[in-house]
Image (cartoon, rainbow, N blue to C red):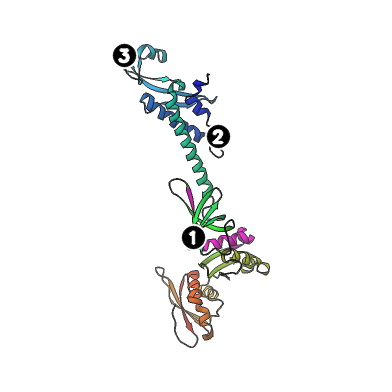
């Protein structure tokens, strides 16, 4: 084949190589679409026969109408038709194999364009599949740029995303080039490339960090039964153990607090701007509520109402001098306890003064 003759669709097909992570079937499908586009432009046919031989060669056939006097590329003379099908007659349609070199330079360019777009689509699909593995997980992201409005551009693998100003306020002691942990909520697309939507404020970030730090959780010995978070302030997490010899709370805290300290530093910086309360989970609602109000001591719990359609409600009596401790700064302790247990908690001091949260 001469150098000049290579400037056709054969050259376009020859340039396509297996891309890492892109299956050969995907590439072949795109090539078939490219051939269909060329046949549509060159011969005016919509449904050509395109198949790959076992040897890797390409067979292209297009339907042509048998005519006594062909007037277009979509027709074939009776004398030529009988060479394809000896029983052909005027008015029949026969499949005629064509030489792809006949497509010419413009057709070859069309094929290249379709094929290369297909490869780009394939690369995008591979990226999406890789990112899907990160969905609902915690990943390390590098801070590429901190913008003037406080938001951050992050790099996750080969993809970039933006951590909003609201989410970025929960990143402490970090600078451009540093790595942070983020929770990947979902994968979206802007029409050009897939984008991970990430969070630093989600309670799931804390849950996943403990799953990483505490082997007993990944071993299904310790389970996180409930978690509630006020980002930047405090998290409450209830855990239980399936092994009577394993203390669930102790496992999460770690020897000398090493495990919980690691999580606290990740979400609250070295200064520990966010605290974490790890408590034991109880099936009994009263015991669970009492544990959730910690560090305040509970004297009595009186159920006000239980209703499947509405939040369960109870009155929690605490010592007078611990009422503010039970409420917490800006009410965050009782609010987190309520979210953790699923109960509406009305705090009441022992002296009888009734306060409601």
Q: Residue at x 35, y 13 (%)?
A: 78
Badge 1 vs badge 2, beta-carbon distance below 8 Å: no
Q: Which residues are magenta?
A: 194-223
Mark-to-mark CA distance, 1 and 3: 73 Å
Which of the 4 image quarters holds residue 257? bottom right
Magenta stretch: includes residue 207: yes
Density class for disc 2 (Cα within 10 Å; few <14, some 14-19, many ≥20) is few
Residue that label 1 marks: 148
Q: Is residue 25 above or below residue 147?
A: above
Task: Let me know if residue 241 appears in the view.
Answer: no
The mark nearer the N terminus, 2 or 3, is 2
Q: Does residue 70 appear left or right of residue 206 in this picture?
A: left
Q: Nearer the viewer, mark 1 or mark 3?
A: 1
Residue 175 location (% of width, % of height): 58, 60
- Classed neighbour count for the residue bearing mark 1: other residues with Cα under 10 Å, few (<14), some (14–19), many (≥20): few
Gap between marks 2 and 3, in whole Å? 45 Å
Q: Earlier in the sequence, mark 1 or mark 2?
A: 2
Q: What residue sits right under mark 3 in the picture? A: 69
Name the spot of residue 238 as percent of width and height, x first: 55, 68
Give whichever of discs 1 and 3 has the lower sequence position. 3
Q: Say which residue label 2 marks.
A: 18
Task: Give residue 262's quadrant in the image.
Answer: bottom right
- Identify which residue, 80 or 82, lies in the foreground: 80
Query: Which residue occupies the foreground of this view, 357 or 105?
Result: 105
Q: Is residue 326 at all visible to an observer of this figure?
A: yes
Image quarter in which the C terminus is found: bottom left
317 lies left or right of 43: right
């Amino acid at each position: 084949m001469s150098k000049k003759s290579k400037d056709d669709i054969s050259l376009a097909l020859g340039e396509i190589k297996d891309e890492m992570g892109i299956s050969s079937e995907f590439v072949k499908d795109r090539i078939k679409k490219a051939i269909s586009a060329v046949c549509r432009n060159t011969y005016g046919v919509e449904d050509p026969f395109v198949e790959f031989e076992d040897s890797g060669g390409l067979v292209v056939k297009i339907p042509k109408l048998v005519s006594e006097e062909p007037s277009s590329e979509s027709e074939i003379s009776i004398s030529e038709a009988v060479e394809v099908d000896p029983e052909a007659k005027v008015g029949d349609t026969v499949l005629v194999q064509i030489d792809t070199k006949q497509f010419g330079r413009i057709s070859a360019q069309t094929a290249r364009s379709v094929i290369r777009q297909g490869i780009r689509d394939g690369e995008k699909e591979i990226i999406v599949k890789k990112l899907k593995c990160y969905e609902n997980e915690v990943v390390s992201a590098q801070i590429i740029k901190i913008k003037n409005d406080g938001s951050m551009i992050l790099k996750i693998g080969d993809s970039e995303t933006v951590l909003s100003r609201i989410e970025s306020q929960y990143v402490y002691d970090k600078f451009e080039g540093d790595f942070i942990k983020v929770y990947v909520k979902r994968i979206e697309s802007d029409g050009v490339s897939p984008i991970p939507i990430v969070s630093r404020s989600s309670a799931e970030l804390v849950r996943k960090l403990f799953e990483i730090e505490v082997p007993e959780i990944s071993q299904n010995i310790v389970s996180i039964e409930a978690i509630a978070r006020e980002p930047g302030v405090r998290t409450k997490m209830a855990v239980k153990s399936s092994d009577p010899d394993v203390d669930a709370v102790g496992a999460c805290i770690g020897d000398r607090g090493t495990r919980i300290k690691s999580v606290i530093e990740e979400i609250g910086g070295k200064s520990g701007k966010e605290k974490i309360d790890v408590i034991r989970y109880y099936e009994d609602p009263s015991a669970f509520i009492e544990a959730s109000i910690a560090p305040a001591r509970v004297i009595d719990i009186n159920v006000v109402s239980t209703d499947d359609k509405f939040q369960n409600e109870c009155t929690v009596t605490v010592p007078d001098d611990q009422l503010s401790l039970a409420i917490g700064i800006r009410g965050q302790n009782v609010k987190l306890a309520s979210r953790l247990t699923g109960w509406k908690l009305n705090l009441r001091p022992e002296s009888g003064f009734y306060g409601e949260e």
